[in-house]
Image (cartoon, grey):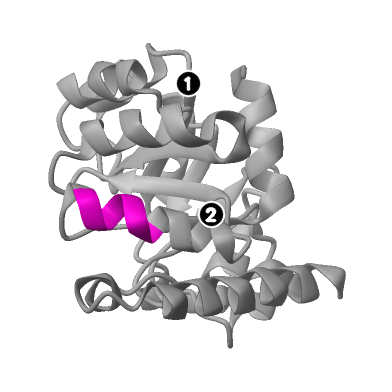
Amino acid sequence: MNKETVLDKIKDLGLLAVIRGPSKELTLQMVEALVAGGVTGIEITYTTPRAAEVVQALDETFDAEIVLGMGTLTDPAQAAEAAQAGAKFLVSPHTEAELAAAMTGTGLAVMLGAFTPSEVMQAVRLGSDVVKIFPGSLGGPAYMKALRGPFPGIPMMPTGGVDENNLKDWFAAGAFAVGAGSKLCPKQLAVDGRFAEITRIAHQFAQAVQAARAV
């Protein structure tokens, strides 16, 4: 799956589940529950224990059934590790030149984190295919809409503060896609073994994204 295909799939899905799992085993079960609920855009963060092993296992299990990536990259060495594990896209919470070079050097789809106008432009100049607006909760949809005024051609994906109630506002503001973490896949539900509840929330989120984009 080449970079352009991955980006097209993410745009079509409109939603990435940003997963900070409590353990390798529970994270794999979280993803199974999400997929059962119709959420197939999966971002495993490096704050998840044995994150690269999780991605390798998911890639072997689901293959093209999901769009799989790794997030919270903060060390350039993680880019090559993530690519080798089977990630199809890479996400960082910030924009830094050495890290960006390592990420873009993999040839995978890249999303660098930014918040201010200067950071957004720096991310693009360093090769970000989509700019991750983080933390989205700080400015909300109105802030991203304002950013898109001077940067109408830059795809933006808010992460942080995304929930079922504001999905419509994010897409109305021009989001390429949205990243949802604890509101979509709460870690505590996995710890408690409540995977059916994760599936239920995922189903609601997936339906809410479709409804929000249909307007």
Residue 29: in magenta span: yes
Residue annotated with mark 2: 157
Overall secondary structure of the magenta section: helix
Residue kind at label 1, given as amino acid type: Leu
Residue annotated with mark 1: 108
Q: Is residue 116 visible in the rendered structure shown here?
A: no
Of badges 2 and 1, nearer the viewer stands 1
Q: Earlier in the sequence, mark 2 or mark 1?
A: 1
Looking at this view, name the residue that lies furthest to the right: 215
Please tell me whether mark 2 sits on a helix, a strand or a loop.
strand
Dot 2, crowdedness within 10 Å: few (<14), some or many (≥20)?
Answer: many
Image-based side of 37 in relation to 114, left or right? right
Q: Residue at x 79, y 76 (%)?
A: 211
Looking at this view, name the residue that lies furthest to the bottom: 165
Residue 109: in magenta span: no
Please tell me whether mark 1 sits on a helix, a strand or a loop.
loop
Number of marks drawn: 2
Q: Is residue 133 above or below residue 65?
A: below
Looking at the picture, how far across and down is residue 82, in whole percent? 30, 25
Quadrant occupied by the C terminus: bottom right
Q: Residue at x 38, y 72 (%)?
A: 195
Image-based side of 153 in relation to 132, left or right? right
Highlighted magenta segment, given as a residue range: 25-30
Q: Distance between the residues labelled 2 and 1?
A: 17 Å
Q: In this view, does 139 lie above or below 103?
A: below
Q: Is residue 32 visible in the rendered structure shown here?
A: yes
Q: Foreground: 89 or 160? A: 89
